[in-house]
Image: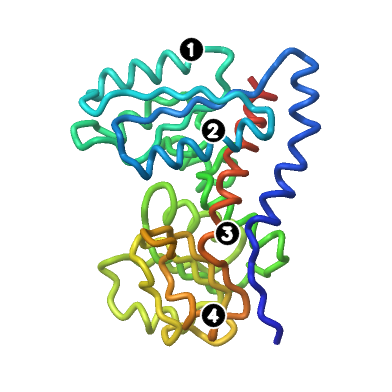
Amino acid sequence: MEKIILDGNVVAQEIKEGLKSRIDLLKNKGITPCLATILVGDNPASETYVRMKGNACKRLGIESIRVHLPEETGTLELIETIKELNNDPSVHGILLQHPVPSQIDERAAFEAIDIRKDVDGVTSTGFGQTALGFGQYPSCTPAAIMKMLDYYQIPIEGKHAVVVGRSPILGKPVSALLLNANATVTTCHSKTANLPEILKHADIVVAAVGLPKFIQGSWLKQGSVVLDAGYNKGNVGDIDYDTCYEAASAITPVPGGIGPITIATLLKHTVDSAEKL
């Protein structure tokens, strides 16, 4: 069987091409889609991510507002900033860059984002709607994973999907999306016993554990589909790519897999919001 390298750049380009005419239509009505990104502190990786998202907006004609708050910012001050953006009719999407400094209650800050502008799917309301199958804006990386499977026409219904990771904006929502697509889903995590044994039964593997080269090819069922949602120092994902490549029928590279689709999904959600607000 021919092995498929799941190319996220191709999928992302299709999403962005589909947005161009919608953005032009909005601009003809005097509306420019606008994404506000909030960065607290000076985390170099976070600064890079925010810059990448801003550049992606610019290339597509979406306005990008960057709000950079000092490292010592408190929870209440951050929430006030979010509320100002909630009340600004020219802002259609709000993204709070994760992680925030330790003194901030990150969950409280996420919850302050207006559900209509929660284009990154970080609120508990957004998560609940996603789990129940009617979420407007599911978390962008889980949505990107589903888009990748759809684009390459990889069957989900009736398949056993194993998600390794349970974070509120990746592992849990992608488990819900796969379940809604009629997969049988096992969600694993750092406390899971016998993970290699569980992965041996997986038709679809989603690596979202945040540990470089963690999942080994010897753990996988031959012919499984492997989606690596991890991104670690040194441009490596959460799977050991070389060994997993041998076992997989389809696999995502890092970089160039899920990442580009995640950013394209964020842009799509911002345009969706601009059309609704």
89 relative to 46, above or below: above
Give the amino acid type for the residue marked by disc 1 in the picture: Asn
What's the mark number on residue 256? Answer: 3
Which of 230/127 is in front? 230
The answer to which of marks 1 and 4 sits earlier in the sequence is 1
What residue is drawn where x is 38% and y is 40%?
46
For the point 36% across and 59% down, which residue is it? 233
Mark 3–mark 2 distance (CA, rounded to whole Å): 18 Å
Point out the frontmost of discs 2 and 1: 2
Horizontal side, residue 107 vs residue 235: left or right: left
Residue 234 point in image, percent of width and height:
39, 62
Q: Splitting the image into 4 quarters, where does residue 112 fall?
A: top left
Residue 49 in percent (x, y) is at 45, 42
Label 2 CA crowd tier, 10 Å (few <14, some 14–19, many 20+): some
Mark 4 lies on residue: 245
Residue placed under numbered mark 1 in the picture:
87
Image quarter in which the C terminus is found: top right
Contact between marks 3 and 2 (CB within 8 A): the answer is: no
Mark 3 neighbour density, 10 Å: few (under 14) some (14–19) many (20 or more): some
Marks 2 and 1, the one that precedes in the sequence: 2
Q: CA distance from mark 1 to mark 4?
A: 48 Å
Kindly check if marks 1 and 4 are in contact, taking CB atoms under 8 A apart as contact.
no
Q: Which residue is mark 2?
A: 54
Kind of element beneath mark 3: loop
What is the three-letter code of the residue carrying label 3? Gly
Q: Amino acid at mark 2?
A: Gly
Q: Quick one: label 4, few (<14), some, or many (20+) residues within 10 Å?
A: many
- The answer to whether one can see residue 37 in this image is yes
Secondary structure category for the residue under label 2: helix
Left/right placement of residue 191 relative to residue 140 reads left
